[in-house]
């Protein structure tokens, strides 16, 4: 009986550590993952996917009635997503509105 209690106690501590030791969304970047659409220009879209410890930002924009998609590598840095393509660009989520802010534009999550 004591052996069984020890196993239950060890398993309880183990599972508690697994769930309690996860990074918050702001640090892990999971809040950024998904599809986003420009609030003013509906043809401008972002898709953010997690790629191991990094992210890929797929930006689709409309140029002269033609869609152009570019892929950018990104990393989490101080609660923001940083695109590293020459000069760094930052993506952040406004906590009040839930909008993603990127390059001076507001993007809304597409469900």
Image (cartoon, rainbow, N blue to C red):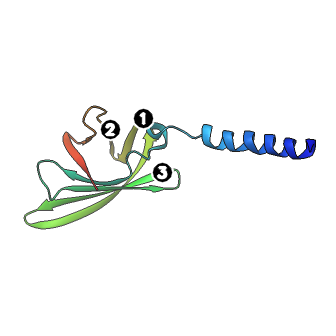
Distance of label 2 from label 3 (alpha carbons): 16 Å
Q: Earlier in the sequence, mark 1 or mark 3?
A: 3
- The residue labelled by disc 1 is 79
Q: How many marks?
A: 3
Secondary structure beneath dot 1 equals: loop
Task: Give how far across and how far down residue 16 sits, in percent.
Answer: 67, 39
- The residue labelled by disc 3 is 54
Q: Which picture quadrant has residue 106?
A: top left
For this orientation, the residue located farthest to the bottom is 66
Task: Give how far across and how far down residue 74 sits, in percent.
Answer: 40, 49
User: Are the residues flagged by discs 1 and 3 in contact, CB closer than 8 Å?
Assistant: no
Task: Give how far across and how far down residue 55 sits, in percent.
Answer: 43, 52
- Between 96 and 105, the one nearer to me in the picture: 96
Q: Residue at x 87, y 47 (%)?
A: 4
Secondary structure beneath dot 3 equals: strand
Distance of label 1 from label 3 (alpha carbons): 14 Å
User: Are the residues flagged by discs 1 and 2 in contact, CB closer than 8 Å?
Assistant: yes
Mark in front: 2 vs 3: 2
Q: Which picture quadrant has residue 76?
A: top left
Q: Earlier in the sequence, mark 2 or mark 3?
A: 3
Q: Residue at x 49, y 43 (%)?
A: 28
For this orientation, the residue located farthest to the right is 2
- Residue 92, which numbered label? 2
The quadrant in which the C terminus is found is: bottom left
- Between 36 and 1, the one nearer to me in the picture: 1
The quadrant in which the N terminus is found is: top right
Packing grade of label 3 (10 A; few <14, some 14-19, many >=20) is some
**Can the viewer see residue 21 in this picture?**
no
For this orientation, the residue located farthest to the front is 1
Secondary structure beneath dot 2 equals: strand
């Amino acid at each position: 009986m004591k052996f069984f209690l020890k196993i239950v106690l060890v398993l309880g501590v183990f599972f508690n550590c697994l769930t309690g030791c996860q990074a918050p969304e702001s640090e892990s970047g999971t809040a950024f993952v998904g599809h986003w659409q420009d609030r003013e220009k509906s043809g401008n879209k972002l898709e953010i996917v997690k790629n191991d410890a990094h992210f890929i930002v797929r930006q689709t924009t409309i140029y002269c009635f033609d869609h152009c998609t570019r892929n950018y590598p990104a990393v989490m840095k101080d609660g923001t997503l940083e695109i590293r393509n020459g000069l760094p660009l930052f993506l952040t989520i406004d906590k009040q509105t839930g909008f993603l802010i990127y390059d001076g534009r507001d993007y809304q999550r597409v469900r």
